[in-house]
Image (cartoon, grey):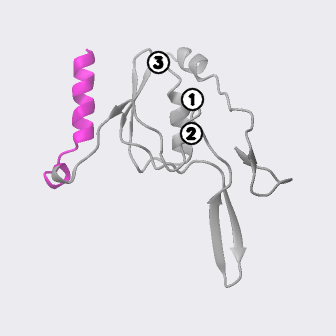
Amino acid sequence: MYPNGDHPGTFYIGKPLSYGWNSIVSSWKFKGEIIVLIDERTLSKGEFELMRLRNSSKVTIIGSNTSGTDGATFTFSLPGNVSINYTGIGIYNPDGTTTQGVGIKPDLFIKRTLNGIRKGKDEVMEFTLNYIQKKK
């Protein structure tokens, strides 16, 4: 979604981006499943790549929602040496749901816990390794 310069405060929906990711993934020599781990530290370009990867049946995304900070950013200066950054376009999943402020949702949700961190455990990695073992 893009700002409409002819009518400030309104927006228009642009043509959806299409990457043909399935054809790229199907041509790879590696024929196994691809597992991608994500969390709130995954942002911007990483979120775009996840939307691309998600189109393949060979990819499973595990973890917790990304930061929800995709989209081109714009910067302008205000008096007093103040700079403002903002996202001026809307980004949506292929199904039409928003990604901004929500993030990319994983296929399998698992999040590290404070208790796990205190014990030196990585619940996301343990879950993923168990998932791989069960798939074998």
Q: Range of the magenta residues?
A: 116-136
Q: Amino acid at mark 2?
A: Phe
Q: Which sits in the foreground, 29 or 40? A: 40
Q: Is residue 119 magenta?
A: yes
Asked whether the residues under the numbered discs 2 and 3 touch, taking CB atoms below 8 Å apart as contact, a structural biologist would say no
Q: Nearer the viewer, residue 85 or 25?
A: 85
| Left or right side of 30 for 115 | left
Q: Amino acid at mark 3?
A: Ser
Disc nearer the start of the sequence (2/3): 2
Give the residue at mark 2. 48
Q: Which mark is residue 57?
A: 3
Q: Looking at the picture, does residue 98 appear above or below residue 128? A: below
Magenta span: chief secondary structure: helix
C-alpha distance separating marks 2 and 3: 17 Å
The quarter of the rendered structure image containing the C terminus is top left
Q: In this rendering, is residue 79 above or below 116? A: below
- The image position of residue 134, as x and y in percent, is 22, 19
Q: State whether residue 26 is above or below residue 38.
A: above
The label nearer to you, 1 versus 2, is 1
Position of 115 with respect to 128 (left or right) is left
Q: Tell whether 16 sits left or right of 125.
A: right
**Which residue sits at x=41%, y=43%?**
65
- Residue visible at 55% across and 41% down in the picture: 98
Helix, strand or loop for disc 2:
helix
Task: Tell me, yes or no, whether the highlighted magenta stretch contains residue 73.
Answer: no
How many numbered marks, from 0 up?
3
Percent position (x, y) of residue 125? 26, 37
Give the numbered dot on residue 95.
1
Neighbourhood count class around disc 2 (C-alpha, 10 Å): few under 14, some 14–19, many 20 upward: some
